[in-house]
Amino acid sequence: MTGDTSFFAGFMDDYFAECDEHLGAIRRHLLAIESAGEGGVDRAMLDDLFRSFHSIKGISGMVELRDAELLAHHLESFLRRLRDGEAQLTADGLDALIEGVDLLERTIAARREHVPSPPAGDVIDRLTGAALETPPAESATIGPADQPAPSWRITFAPSPQLVARGINVDTVRARLRAAGTILDATPRMLPDGIAFEFAFAGELDPETVEAWRSEGLTVERVDAPVVASTERSITADAGARAVQPSHVVRVDLTRLDDLMRIIGDLVIARARLEDSLRRIVKHVPAVEWRAVQENSLTIERQLRDLREGIMRVRLVPVSEIFRRMPFVVRDLTREQGKKVRLQLDGQHTEIDKFLIERMLDPVLHLVRNAVSHGFELPEERVQAGKPAEGTLRLTAAGVGESVVLEIIDDGRGIDAGQVAARARAAGLPVPAGPLDEATLLDLICTPGFSTRDVTDRASGRGVGMSVVKNTVQELNGTLRLETARGEGTRFVIELPLTLSIADALIATVGDRTFALPQPSVREVVEIDPAALRRVEHQEIAPFRGGVLPIVRLARVFGIPAAPRPRLHVFVIGAGQDAVGLAVDRIVGQREIVVRTMADPLVRVGGIVGATDLGDGRVVLILDPPALARRARAAEQQPAGAS
Amino acid sequence: MHRTLIVDDSPTMRRMVMASLRDVCAGGFVEAASGLEAIEQLALGPAALMVLDLNMPDMHGLEVLRFVRSHDAYRDLPVMILTTRGDDQSRAAALAAGASMYLTKPFTPHTLAAQVRTLLERPRQGQGTR
């Protein structure tokens, strides 16, 4: 038995990596559920959560982390009951779920740090208890969404030739998902072998059908279901698309901007009202106060609905960017003698029109970079044992309140040594030792950095990696890099769905008040200042068996602050990148109207904009990623830090 | 000897299975992360053995098994069900659907290797006629 234990001990890195992945997905789903309220839970989300817990349970058992296995088991059972409609997600249930996930994360982290698992407390009891609540009689809240009728039958017969071209059941499925809805996927045994039959609902233009057919797919239109009334099927047959009246109105974006601004003013006005109300609460009889309070809350809810309605109007599909890429890729590959297949996933993902316009150039740049620098020439690829044709994937997906764009190539990957050498030659400071991906990204995004001595046409435009990074940051987004030598590179851009109004946590430092965009805060903890240690110029606190660099906002912004018995710390970033922002007091959570600081003269590092909380004072909105970078930079170059 | 097909949606689990079977499965491995991928791999080349998880995203392992057993070309393929423990109802269902063997996770590399060895040495009905 001991021999077996040590056998799987070699897999701990895989284990932690996979757990991180699942926990990340779980957190995203929980955030989405939390922000959407109880009605925001759908079957697919529950399925995903269930599967993540199931996987963690399975692999935790293998590495003999029994506490995690047991906890994941209870979380999985809880999800199963929700999914099967045996229980409904109540506020208590959601709390228990979140606490359970938190404990699971800490249990796994404890194993990583070789410390004992944290005490389970009553989480498991609460999970089993919460799951016992039976749903009300008419529980129709969770169930599969209304499914459209299939309009196409698409058959794919896999073959080694197609697989060599990068066409397999997964890529076919992804393509169908991007273009519409897969209602059903069934393997079939045909006379020539196995084939997959997809029942698909969606609009396909003739070009797409042609393109798919040329790639070996059989695409057949399925007639409208017979159950439909005769009248309807006749119109459908008569080319309904041509005669259907248009219900679309084109609106100038500035008009929507005006509306959004008015709503922003309304949000502030309501906050002011709330503030005034709070001041008169003692002078009003309780009964009447309740009515006033209820009305105020109703207005808040309606405002939120109104804001979301306008926001939805502003959303456009990512395909506005994506559809330009095939031309760019075709031209560049032809010019450079490369073979690259472009795969677009999630084109229907929607994002704010303003963001899409700002993101076009950065995405173009990343695509050009991938083709010019990322992919090898076909013969090099073959020598390296890869298919001659490279695959460039652009994906978009909505995750809660944000949208994630990915630009993924299966080219040569970024050569960290070359980047370091180039950076040194350009006189940029390069940390000693192996470069991690975040540092690598920072280097290639430094203005004046270019891995090629000769700027070719592709990268010779006005946009460089530094512009890509700046644009993403201006839009309150994050840019991440993953790369592996010989395997490829992935750029991940995460953007908020929309700018202008956001949920924020409000905190004070000395006599100042700050707002922090809520999505960037991973958790809030209290730390005893006595536990802090100082390493060079950086304060660090023990945290989850590791250490957490602490940034005191009072110091960053030069605010006089009295010493406090406890530090309130916002944890931002995950894993190695986690940083704690210390404040004096956390006031609460608010919906804020973001006014970005466009004027470079008033722009300050670490601040993204300002807001008005309703009491007339201007409150600065912090830029957590920038503050985190500052902390990391201080950590890495203690001597030369500015 | 043909390849061994490892079907599990967890990459860690697939690696653990492959590490356990390294000395038993001489024909090498091929991995599939979902039911459809597993069936695709069957279409792409012959397999000596399939190690199959049950709980997977797109297609349940039992459906994969039923597909395999309902077609002549794969009827005799040894299929080892390897699923997370605590789901004992599935054992009967898997055996009824034609699983050659049923093992639960967590497993030890030694047991898995021993069971697979037994499975591969078991005479296969109809083998050699094709």
Image (spheres, coloured by chain):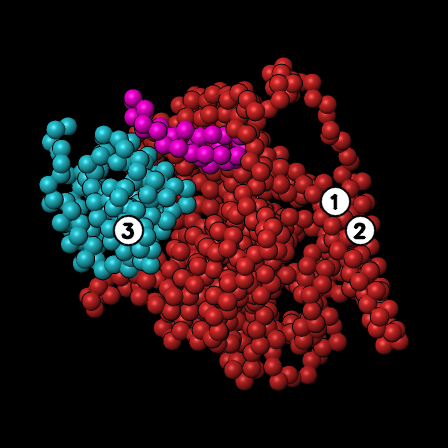
Chain colours: A red, B cyan
Residue denoted by label 2: A263
Query: Same subunit under labels 2 and 3?
Result: no
| Image quarter in which the N terminus of chain A is found | bottom left
Residue type, mark 1 in image = Ile
Q: Is residue A238 above or below residue A169?
A: above
> Which of the chains bears the disc numbered 3?
B
Where's residue A578, x and y in %?
52, 65
- Tell me the chief SS of the magenta region: strand
For residue A250, side relative to residue A218 (left or right): right
Q: Secondary structure at mark 1?
A: helix
Where's residue A527, x and y in %?
56, 78
Residue denoted by label 1: A310
Between A86 and A18, the one nearer to me in the picture: A86
The residue stretch that appears in magenta? A172-201
Query: Same subunit under labels 3 and 1?
Result: no
Distance between mark 2 and mark 3 Cα atoms:
59 Å
Between A518 and A217, the one nearer to me in the picture: A217
What residue do we see at 47% from left, 60% from top? A78
Residue denoted by label 3: B91
Between A181 and A169, the one nearer to me in the picture: A181
Q: Is residue A619 above or below residue A81?
A: below
Residue type, mark 2 in image = Ile
Q: Secondary structure at mark 2?
A: helix
Q: Select label 2 or label 3 by which is in front.
A: 3
What residue do we see at 44% from left, 30% from top? A198
